[in-house]
Image (cartoon, grey):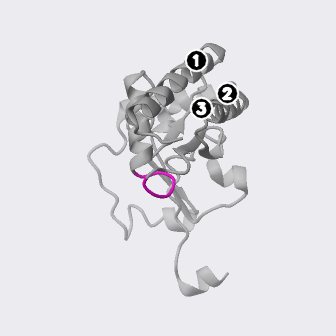
Amino acid sequence: MTRRRAGTRDRPYTVITGFRLGLGGAAASFDVYPDLAVYGKAIAGGWPVAALVGRSDLMDLLGGPVNHSGTFNGSVMACAATIATLGLISNDPPYERMVGYGTALMEGLKAVGDEASVPLHIEGLPMAFYVAPLPAPDGPAGGPASLRLSRHLADFGVWTTTRGLWFVSAVHGDAELNWTLDRFTKALGAGLSSGALVP
C-alpha cells in the first residue's frame, strides 16, 4: 500500500528463480506477485530469450506511450523454444525431482566438507544454492575463497560460478550425484593440499 502511494513499482529480477522453483516462478512459490517481473532463458530451455510480465495496466503501456523495441523481439525460434519448454514442464513438472536431487547434493557437500574438516556455508534452495568455505582464510564466506574453490572444482570437471553458486537440472540423478560428490571430494583435497583452503 505504501509502495503504491509513493508511486514506485515492484519489479523483481527473477532470472535465477523464475521457473526453477515452479511453473509460476518465485511469485507463485512465495505468494508474492510483483507489478512487473523479468524472466530469462529458463522459460525456453536455455535458448536466449527474456520475458517481461506484469499487471495489465502496466503491460498495456507497451506499444503505446512506452516504447519496447529490440532486435530479437518476437524471434520465431525463441518463441518456438519457449512454447516447447513450457509445454514440457507443464506436462511433466520436474520440480519434485529437482528438490530431491538438490537436497541430496547439499547434504552430500556438507558431509564431504565435514569429513575434510572444512566447514562449508551452504545456503539457498535445492535448485540454486550457495557454497563457500567457512571460515574463509582471508575473510568472510565467499570472495577469494569461493573463487579458489571454483577453480579447483573446474579442474575436476565441476562448474560453479566463481562466487559459489550451484545450479541443478531436472536431468540430474543418482549417477550425477555420486560423480559430483566424488569430484567435490577430490577438489576439496586438492585445495587443502595446495594451501588454497585452510581447514
How many badges with numbers are in the image? 3
x, y percent for residue 28: 70, 51
Nearest-to-viewer mark from 3 and 1: 3
Q: In the rendered image, which residue does mark 2 sit on?
A: 101
Stretch of the chain drawn in magenta: 138-143
Q: 137 above or below 81?
A: below
Q: 159 above or below 1?
A: above
Q: CA distance from mark 3 to mark 2?
A: 22 Å
Between residue 97 and residue 67, name the one nearer to us. 97
Badge 3 crowding class, 10 Å Cα cut-off, few under 14, some 14 to 19, many 20 or more, is: some
Amino acid type of the residue tagged 1 in the rendering: Glu
Q: Residue at x 37, y 34 (%)?
A: 151
Q: Are marks 2 and 1 in contact (CB under 8 Å)?
A: yes
Q: Earlier in the sequence, mark 3 or mark 1?
A: 3
Q: Earlier in the sequence, mark 2 or mark 1?
A: 2
Q: In the rendered image, which residue does mark 1 sit on?
A: 176
Q: Is residue 19 visible?
A: no
Residue 99 highlighted magenta (yes or no): no
Classify mark 2: helix, strand or loop.
Answer: helix
x, y percent for residue 148: 39, 40
Amino acid type of the residue tagged 2 in the rendering: Tyr
x, y percent for residue 51: 46, 48
Q: CA distance from mark 3 to mark 1?
A: 21 Å
Q: In the rendered image, which residue does mark 3 sit on?
A: 116
Place residue 46 in its image quadrant.
top left
Q: Residue at x 49, y 48 (%)?
A: 15
Classify mark 1: helix, strand or loop.
Answer: helix
Between residue 181 and residue 20, name the one nearer to us. 181
Left-right relation of 98 to 46: right
